[in-house]
Amino acid sequence: MSWRRWALTGLGCLAAVYAIATVDLILRARSAYLEGEKYLEWNRNPALKKLHFEAARADKEERLRREFQTGRITAAELEQKLELARFESDQAMAESSLKYAYVWFQTAVELFTPPESRWVVMSRLKLAQTRELWKKELDAKKIPYREYMLD
């Protein structure tokens, strides 16, 4: 091959890698944005959050009961793991949906840019709004915080 063909092949490979990386970042930004939106929706409609975590707990409890029935765990282990599943579910329900929404929007803005995709732009807008909502939630619950703690 001539040096021109090698150069063109190299440039083509470089362009392909750049394109793949760009598409990957855009898709990751979209995923982070949509996760943030999910948590914002859970804040607006806590029943959806409750349904999600109850379903997850029911799945886990069912898996544990099957493990018990097949003899992989004892009755004592089953009770301990069921209690842990209930505790984890309750903890997840108690967590702030706004905090998680903020973190997902922040992730899209900080980790998946450049390129400045529409998902990053929308996340940046939602980030400021969500931060204010989260601060109001913390104030309402009388949870002390400093600005640097929110980042």
Image: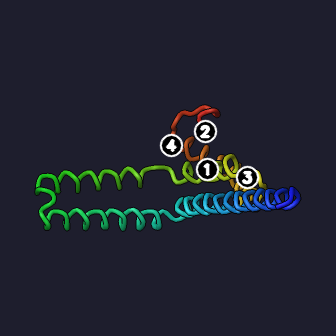
Residue 93 visible to an observer of this rendering: yes
Q: Earlier in the sequence, mark 1 or mark 3?
A: 1
Amino acid at the residue labelled 1:
Tyr
Q: CA distance from mark 2 to mark 1?
A: 9 Å
Which quadrant is the N terminus positioned in? Answer: bottom right
Q: Earlier in the sequence, mark 3 or mark 2?
A: 3
Image coords of residue 123 (percent x, y)? 70, 56
Residue 129 visible to an observer of this rendering: no
Amino acid at the residue labelled 3:
Arg
Answer yes or no: do the residues labelled 2 and 1 have beta carbons within 8 Å? yes
Tell me the crowding category of disc 2: few under 14, some 14 to 19, or many 20 or more residues within 10 angstroms, Cα based: few
Which quadrant is the C terminus positioned in? Answer: top right
Tell me the crowding category of disc 4: few under 14, some 14 to 19, or many 20 or more residues within 10 angstroms, Cα based: few
Q: CA distance from mark 3 to mark 4?
A: 26 Å
**Residue beneath disc 2:** 150
Residue at the (30%, 51%) spot, across then down: 87
**Residue beneath disc 4:** 141
Residue closest to the eye, 11 or 50: 11
**Residue beneath disc 1:** 102
Q: CA distance from mark 1 to mark 3?
A: 10 Å
**Residue beneath disc 3:** 124
Residue at the (46%, 63%) spot, across then down: 49
Nearer to us of marks 4 and 1 is 1
Q: Earlier in the sequence, mark 2 or mark 1?
A: 1
Q: Earlier in the sequence, mark 3 or mark 4?
A: 3
